[in-house]
Image: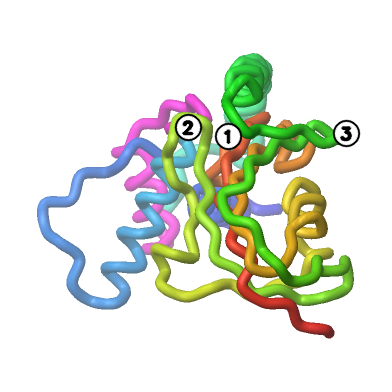
Amino acid sequence: MNHRQTIHALLLLLSINLPLIGCENKPKSAIDRQSYAAGIQMAETFKKGGVKLNPRMVEQALQDVLNERPLHMKNEDIQAELLALSQRAQERRQKDAQSNLNEAKKFMDAYMAEKGVKKTNSGLLYRILQTGKGRRPKPFEFIKLHYTGKLSNGQIFDSSILRGKPSELSVNAVIPGWREALQLMPLGSKWEIVVPPALAYGATGTTLIPPNSALIFELELLGIKQP
């Protein structure tokens, strides 16, 4: 891999994974909006990972590569710094994962003590908000539902209700906690469930969900479709 290919790899990493570079003007064109959105995603991802970067150096690297100017680091130095960056992020993520696991247990213990909460053998917690009278979906079937997903601090990370349109998906294509809950819910039911990390996204997490997070979902089963 040559110097520019390595920098391009770094830019690709940045595009999915930076402190925000200030912008005095609101993005207007499509490319401005997309660039700004990508910058926000980069910044938030690095911020969550506890990685500190110099925004001016990031901007200079972008300009050097895009304008095909000589690079100021040798290829082996670039590789070494990227490795160090990755290791730092991984160490922070592992530390956060253990802390989040402890918090998830505390949260689930407190939730379990609330009125009407039940627990399955897998550790899934649920509370029936509305009892449906239809049949239960099977693993191979498709369902139509409204849902809202929250972190244990109440922050919403996804919601079909906010999007204004129910979701349609296969029971087999969701996280284990959903898969278990959905097969227990009669059509027309509305449940609040708390999914332990092992039945959600585990120690890996996602861009929006920290590692080892317990997740709260409100699920309303609206329809069942055979494949």
Of callouts 3 and 2, which one flags the residue occurring earlier in the amino acid sequence? 2
* Residue 64 x, y percent position in the rendering: 39, 53
Check whether the beta carbons of the residues at disc 2 and disc 1 lie within 8 A of each other. yes
Q: Residue at x 59, y 62 (%)?
A: 220
**Secondary structure state at the residue bearing disc 2:** helix
Disc number placed over residue 210 in the picture, else none: 1
Q: Which three-letter amino acid code belongs to the residue tagged 2?
A: Lys
Identify the residue under disc 2: 48
Crowdedness near tag 2: few (<14), some (14–19) or many (≥20) residues, C-alpha within 10 Å: some
Q: In the picture shown, does residue 121 fall above or below 99?
A: below
- Residue at mark 1 to residue at mark 3: CA–CA distance: 25 Å
Check whether the beta carbons of the residues at disc 3 and disc 2 lie within 8 A of each other. no
Q: Which residues are magenta?
A: 47-68
In depth, the one of 91 and 133 nearer the eye is: 133
Q: Which three-letter amino acid code belongs to the residue tagged 3?
A: Asn
* Residue 129 x, y percent position in the rendering: 56, 49
Identify the residue under disc 3: 121
Q: Residue at x 59, y 45 (%)?
A: 192
Q: Residue at x 53, y 73 (%)?
A: 166
Of callouts 2 and 1, which one flags the residue occurring earlier in the amino acid sequence? 2
Image-based side of 1 in relation to 42, left or right: right
Q: Which three-letter amino acid code belongs to the residue tagged 1?
A: Pro
